[in-house]
Amino acid sequence: MLIDWFTVFAQVVNFLVLVYLLKRFLYQPILQAIDERENRIATQLQEAAAQQAAADEQHQQFDRLNAALKQHKESLLAAAQSEAEAEQQRLLDEARQAYDELRTRLQDALVKEQARLSVELRKQVQQETFSIARKTLADLANVPLEAQIMAVFIEKLQALGTSTIAQLSAALQSANHPLVVRSTFAISAEQQARIAQVVKSLINDKTTLEFQTGKEEVGGIELSANGYKIGWNITDYLDALEKRVAGVVENWQKNPAQVENINHDN
Amino acid sequence: MSLTPDDQIFWQFGCFKLNATIVWTWVVMLILVIGARLITRRLSRDIHISRWQNMLEIIVLGILEQMKEVGLKKPEKYLGYIGTLFLFIVTANLCTIFPVYEPPTGSLSTTAALALSVFMAVPLFGIEKKGVVGYFKTFMEPTPIMLPFNIIAEFSRTLAMSVRLFGNIMSGSMILAILLTITPFIFPIVMTLLGLLTGMVQAYIFSILATVFIASAMQSAAN
């Protein structure tokens, strides 16, 4: 007989014992360990997810802060740039103003210098002209220049019209001042007497005269009463000369060659 | 040479006897329990686990997975029974690589005992699930005429399972013994390898069949 019933019974018991033992020592601990590990992993995953969410939140916050910082930086840069441009403009304006002031001062100084030079030149030319005229008159006619000027002046006085004399008289009366005769050169007593005589004959005998000599600005001789003037002077000639010289200079500036040619032709 | 290890009796007192089947069953039991105890003594609950623990987890989860695939709703409840069935047969068959070892599954008494336990377990689990009346009602389905056939089927499948396991393991041992006498070299090794494979397959088939029976009992109980 292949089946031994005692052995069968014993094996059933053995098997049931083995089931119990393996349940006790194998399946329960293993399943428990697996469950615990799964729970732990699930917890860790949840924590990781929470941390990830927190990290995402922080990342977004960081992004927002970064964007705000960038914007702030750009606005600061823009402000600084506009400030720098304003400062540049201000400095440029200051420099331009300083330049303008300096140029104005220079121009003023130049104008003043020109004026001074012009006056000086005029004086020189006047003296030279007088000198040449004096010498020429002395050489050619043996007549002093001053005497000739005086003669011309007296002729002018004598040739005054009645209306002019009336005006002169009126000016003399309103000013209540003596008539002033100013001259560049010295006037001799004889000549003074001659002038006084002519004036008195024109206006009246009570007219008094005051002679002022050495007045270079007169450029000749003149009789004045309260702004009213009669006389002879070189100023007109000098003005004409100045105009002509100015014209020549202007032409030379425009066309130097042509002026040169003109000068050569002359 | 004996056909079954039952014939090797070490000690006898009346009807009580200590034969090779029982002794080697105890050895297998010791190996299983001590091995399990050694490994599960220091189980890690952490992510990092030892290789032995990993192996045990793979085995246990593999058994659970197979049971689930067969159709058991709560495989953890039947793990102790089905898993032990599988592990016992596997270990008993694997140990055939040791020279003096006589596999207890090569005894018709052992396979009959295992088949008997399945034969008893199936209605017990069914009754636990549906109650006594509910379970026995399933024998009269689809019609009461089927009652005798159902009863015959219940017994015959138990018998078939036990004979199948016994025949395969016993034949393996027998062929090995015969071949050892004819060609003592090389060929027995190949046959041993084949025997190991057959043993594994038998363990799998036995366990799966037991699961299928239990699952079908559960299924009909559920219906």
Image (cartoon, coloured by chain):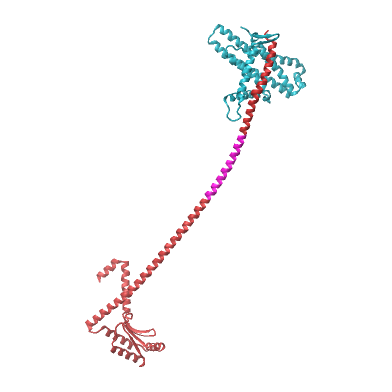
Q: Nearer the viewer, residue A169 or B87?
A: B87
Decide if residue B152 is on the left or right side of residue A248: right
In the image, farthest residue toward the bottom: A205
Image coordinates for residue B106, horizontal then vertical, percent: 63, 12
Decide if residue A48 is on the left or right side of residue A117: right
Decide if residue A125 is on the left or right side of residue A51: left
Q: Is residue A184 magenta?
A: no
In the picture, the quarter occupied by the N terminus of chain B is top right
Image coordinates for residue A189, horizontal then vertical, percent: 29, 89
Chain letter of the red region: A
Decide if residue B6 is on the left or right side of residue A71: right
- At 31% from the left and 87% from the top, the residue drawn is A154
The image quarter in which residue A209 lies: bottom left
In the picture, the quarter occupied by the C terminus of chain B is top right
Image coordinates for residue B108, horizontal then vertical, percent: 66, 11
Q: Chain B is shown in which shade?
A: cyan
Image coordinates for residue A181, horizontal then vertical, percent: 34, 86
Q: Is residue A54 magenta?
A: yes
Magenta residue span: A43-71
Mark yes or no: residue B202 visible.
Answer: no
